[in-house]
Image: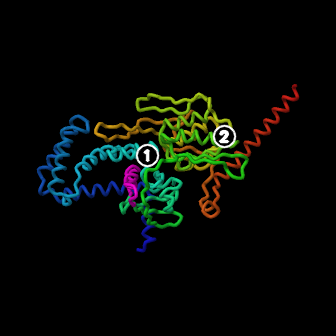
Amino acid sequence: MDRSEEIDNKVESQKRSREFRNGVITGGLVTALLFVGIYAGGTAYQMYKVREAQADAAQSDESVINADTLQKMKLIEDAIASYYYYEDDISYEELQDGIYKGMVNSLGDPYSEYYSREELEEVMSSNMGISYGIGAYISINKQMNMAMISGVMEESPALDAGLREGDIIYEVDGESTQGMSLTQVVSRVKGKENTDVHLTIYRESENDLLEIDIKRAKRLETNTVDYGMLENTDQLGYLRIREFDAVTVDQFTEAMAELRGQGMKGLVLDLRSNPGGDLAAVVDIARKILPEGLIVYTENKAGSRKEYTGDGKREIDIPLVVLVNEYSASASEILAGAIQDYNKGTLIGTTTYGKGIVQQIQKLDDGTALKLTISAYYTPSGRNIHGIGIEPDIELEYDYEASENEGIDNQVEKAIEILEGKIKLLQVQNKSSILLCTFFI
């Protein structure tokens, strides 16, 4: 089998996400059966005691952590210490973290995670808008169930190396990313400054795996907002929010002030491939766009409702178009959904990701943490879009061919068309208002 055929087979198999997940589960069962088959003769009494403990547990308290669970964990630890061949590779801290990760992973919720000390540090630094990596944003590609480049920072190692939005991170330093959470992928890509990381990237347009070496940068401050005036338009502004972090609100405020100072008459707000982020940040930004009223509300499992509202004092007063795609998720859907519910702007693009649940990071006293799904969120009209997404007002697929060959963003072009039409309509309405006033005077 040649390399191209191998790639096709791998990619096709990963696109079958359900079969991929079933394969992971089956592989785990095979490993367990091998362990029992090899050691059944030497640990017959111990294996019996485990089965006996499991039977007792079924009749006792339903708590996961009980005497029987602890006994079984001790038996597994003893077996590893007695029989595991690669003894020098054992890290007992990683074994402990593995126990906690396994417990949370068994929930079957891809958004709930256990963070080790190192992983929590990465998450917190990322949320503060600080990065020590290659200068790229990542999210999950739903079709392939793998990490994907969702954005590349300007003047970054990722940009210099040729990474593009949509690239699938297939391997990091030769280690497959199959089954990894975003946090796990990030922790492998990041590292000490000025060291190299080797990425194996799948690029659909080339139907090939690309081998890319990138030198990790010094400390980077994340620029989550890009903006500017669109050329050859009637004073239209463009503002892209890549994600919602602690630094995003200030960056958004500064960008809007700069665009208004340049005479902006209409705004293209780009939320494409925005994976979400901080709830407080997106609510603060929504308060600078929406009229007075409800922005979003959440409900937990007890039915307790928490509302987030705005006073409308900073409501945007110019025509607005919002760009979304299938990778616009979570916080970006909160903003897009609220804008749509208030009919404050026109949504253009493709149906969004559909993440309508909220997670909370709960720090533990040993420096680790849990991220758990704690509630669902609803748009002002009461929509929960989890697993559904938000349908744009104007459905328009992104034209990758036009972008690569001609440098044309067809969705931005459509946004310009819509905005210019709205501006002309406003001008006509203003003229009519002046004429009416003149007539009655």
Query: Considering depth in this image, is 88 or 75 the residue closer to the camera?
Result: 88
Quadrant of residue 428 in the image? Answer: top right
- Residue 260, labelled with which disc? 2
Chain-order first, disc 2 or disc 1: 1
The residue type indicated by label 2 comes to Arg
Q: How is the image coloured?
A: rainbow
Quadrant of residue 315 in the image? Answer: top right
Quarter the N terminus occupies: bottom left
Residues in magenta? 177-196
Give the residue at x 58% y 45%: 391
- Left or right: 143, with 396 as reference point: left
Secondary element under disc 1, as helix, strand or loop, is: helix
The residue type indicated by label 1 comes to Ser
**Residue holding disc 1:** 126
Instruction: Identify the residue at the far bottom of this view.
Output: 2
Secondary element under disc 2, as helix, strand or loop, is: helix
Magenta highlight on residue 21: no
